[in-house]
Image (spheres, grey):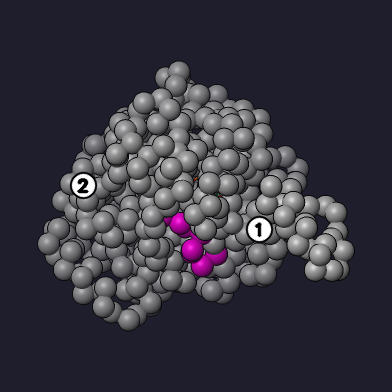
Amino acid sequence: MDKTLARLRCAELDGAAPAEHGWHGVGGPEPLRCAEAGCGGEAIEGNTCPRCGGLLEFAEPHGIGRDALVQILRDRSVATSAIDRSGVWRFRELLPHIDEARIVSLDENEIPLQEAPRSAAWSGVERVAVYHCGRNPSGSFKDAGMTVAVSFAAARGSRVALCASTGNTSAAMAAYAARAGMGAFVLAPAGGVSQAKVAQTLAYGAHVLTIEGDFDDALRLARAVGAASREVALVNSVDPYRIEGQKCVAFAMLEQRRWRAPDWVVLPGGNLGNVSALGKGFREALALGLSDRLPRLCVVQASGAAPFARAWESGAELEPVKAQTVASAIRIGNPVSWRKARRELRACDGLALALSDEDILEARRAIGGDGLGCEPASAASLAGVRELRRRGVMRADEDVVCILTGHVLKDSSVVEPIAPEPVANSVDAVLSAMLKEKK
Ligand code: F0G
């Protein structure tokens, strides 16, 4: 088959064989299929199934064996080119095909697993490792997906990238769109985005339009705008290319661990694209023979924005809520990828939790104690570890990885109280203030 053929399938196909399309696009020989269970719908482009309106996804990669892949990755580990280094594009045999010259990369997802001993002690496990996506070029996990979404959008000839965002998607989109020479527009919920993220997005030259309503309203609008114009590429996580990039976090993590899966991977959840992508990545790694088993995934929502955790507990369909939490990044009441997320949790014996803002902020302080730091939403992962221990679901000696999704400087609206009184400009006054603070 021609290398430039691509197909998309509905992500709800659940195991049925995908059909081939003769679509001459920029993708690889993989179709897009509907992700909705039993739908079987397929598409050659776009992000919604023409049959049921569900989300689309790429089929699993095939046609390459474990040994060949491991050898390619070994060769790339000493290569110097940017795409061989990238924690997304060095796995390009497992991604939709694109001409290498068209890849828009900023050295994303090159992230070492780090031990976090104080966080481990706080949460009641012997050891915890963090995978800190705040080390990405725009400071959040969004870069891994955005490099793929923007590369394909630019290659398709889209002139403008668009997203709804609580701030991190917008910063990542703005950075990659700038690099690709594309325009970038953000629909931001009024009052719902940290100032630091808006400033960052503007610094990359994007345009920010404030929308009345919350993130869920902004995403609905962005999807409608994306559907109405062929020039506009919608790069929210409804875009199956985003998910392909984000699944590489699973590959990069496993590669560092010599392809040995951890017992648990714990991460925050909002719109639920990330847990869907990680689940897909771990499943694909297992199917390819790269890893030995699936880790159990635990996705953690803030209790004021936890429609998925509630649906998971009750076994019912998701009921959207008006979201409320100090963790603005995950202030999302109608997560668009919830069915994909449910499928992934079921596949790996995972679970979803809802935890209070207090728990999340306490976890953030514990992470700060390891000199790592993260934005509030990210700390939901460590709070989740403590809760899993409390419930007796996780043993103290299990092998745990927490995904920290965003950099500590991303959201300064939730900070420890700063001493409001100015201190006199004298050595004595400073020493006595220091003593007082220490108590
Ligand atoms: N953590 C952070 C720091 C985030 O920015 C987000 C989502 C999540 C977790 C949740 O990830 O939606 O894939 O479940 N931020 C989006 C944004 C919504 O617009 O930046 P998810």
Magenta region: 131-138
Question: Quick check: is the Cβ at mark 1 less than 8 Å away from ligand 1?
Answer: yes
Q: Residue at x 38, y 77 (%)?
A: 82
Q: Is residue 251 above or below residue 215?
A: below
The amino acid sitting under disc 1 is: Lys
Where's residue 299, x and y in %?
44, 37
Is the distance from the Cβ of mark 2 to the nearest ligand 1 atom less than 8 Å? no
Foreground residue among 206 and 24: 206
* Residue 37 appears in the picture as rendered: no
Above-or-below relation of 72 to 412: below
Of 311 and 435, the residue lying toward us? 435
In this rendering, the answer to whether 44 lies above or below 381 is below
Q: Is 150 in the magenta?
A: no
The residue to which callout 2 is attached is 286
Q: Is 435 displayed left or right of 173 in the figure?
A: right
The residue at which mark 1 appears reads as 197
